[in-house]
Image (spheres, grey):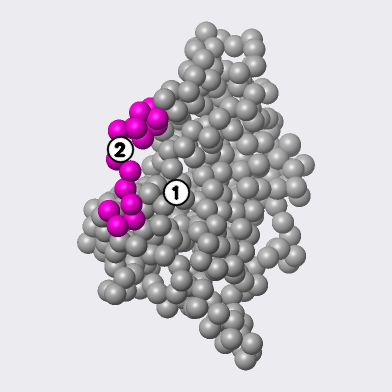
Amino acid sequence: MVPSRLEVMQYVEKFVAEKLPVFLRNPELNWQPSDYTPDLSTDEGFEALRELREEASRLPEDALIILVGDMITEEALPSYASWISTLEGVGATGEPQTAWGAWNRAWCGEENRHGDLLNRWLYLSGRVNMREVEVTVQNLIADGGDTQSENDPYRTFIYTSFQEVATRISHLNVGKLARTVGAEKLYNLSAKIAGDEHRHARAYKYFISKILEVDTNETLLAFQDMMKKKITMPAMYMRERGEQVGDTFKKFEEVAKRSGVYTGWDYVEIVEQLLAEWDVEHLTDLSPAAAKAQDYLCRLPGRYRTLLERVQSRQPRKSSTDVEPIAFSWLYPHEVTTSNAL
């Protein structure tokens, strides 16, 4: 059973209220999806559409699949919003105008733009079977997910601290792949989304830093628990038409790994970043259990790196022609595999 977090979350809320103007943007001044997609009410918009489609035609299929998977992940926002709203001391229980409630709603509003923007770009690209993508989105929202955070705000904000950084890496690396083939506009919109994820990661890491100040032992135990379970991405249950829960995510994960968009090395670097952010190594006056958790956490990156090096040394290097094709229903029949991997 998770101990009550109510008193701590109520204490931390006043710091959250002070930081909301830093971690959030005014919707009337913030960028919007229409800023990065053609305005089809003008002749110039149709020329911009032609340029978008020309850029999209140069994008390798692996990069396109990752872009679709990232969009589907972003489009499952209703699941994430409802999940955050159930956390003890964070959810809207009674008084709606709380700092936690304001954060969750505004965070969701900012995140909502990401799915909208990627959805429009993919639709306009002409390379994606949007109906099959939409089936996958609806399946993912219906199936939900399991972050293994037990509706605990400590575990949840450790998870979101990690996940926001991971999402930033994915969007940035897709943008870099786009830039290699001259898709500069796609690079720019990917960088905009990544910028949001970076700011959101700063917010969640700040929440945990304030929780650590007043409940260090329990926060370390929660951190240890999440690392032992391993962080899985929120779209872990992704599935296409007729597939079992999670089948599509496994394929998507493989494409992301082999194209270098998100790998085990990124995972360990995020762990190292969080350990440094929260200065875990130098925390003192710990309970015996928390001291063991501290030791476990500080040793974890080294263990991961050793394991990754062993796995990498055992795997034969493959050229792009050796990569086995992976079929996705998201692409039209003439390009339903990722055989032209990056």
- In the image, is 63 to the left or to the right of 162? left
As helix, strand or loop, the secondary structure at mark 1 comes to: loop
**Magenta-highlighted residues:** 307-322
Q: Looking at the image, which is closer to me, 167 or 338?
A: 338
Q: In the rendered image, which residue does mark 2 sit on?
A: 315
Is residue 83 shown above or below 75?
above
Residue 132 showing in the rendered view: no
Which-is-in-front pick, marks 1 and 2? 2
Residue 254 showing in the rendered view: yes
Q: Quadrant of the N terminus?
A: top left
For the residues labelled 1 and 2, the Cα–Cα distance comes to 15 Å
Residue at coordinates 27% horizontally, 53% vertically from top-left? 322
Residue at coordinates 56% horizontally, 24% vertically from top-left? 219
- The total number of labels drawn is 2
Q: Quadrant of the C terminus?
A: bottom left
Q: What numbered label is drawn on residue 260?
A: 1
Is residue 181 shown above or below 24?
below
Residue at coordinates 67% horizontally, 36% vertically from top-left? 206
For disc 1, the neighbor class at 10 Å (few under 14, some 14 to 19, many from 20) is some
Residue at coordinates 50% horizontally, 59% vertically from top-left? 177
Q: Position of residue 321 (x, y in %)?
A: 30, 57
As helix, strand or loop, the secondary structure at mark 2 comes to: loop
Is residue 82 shown above or below 177?
above
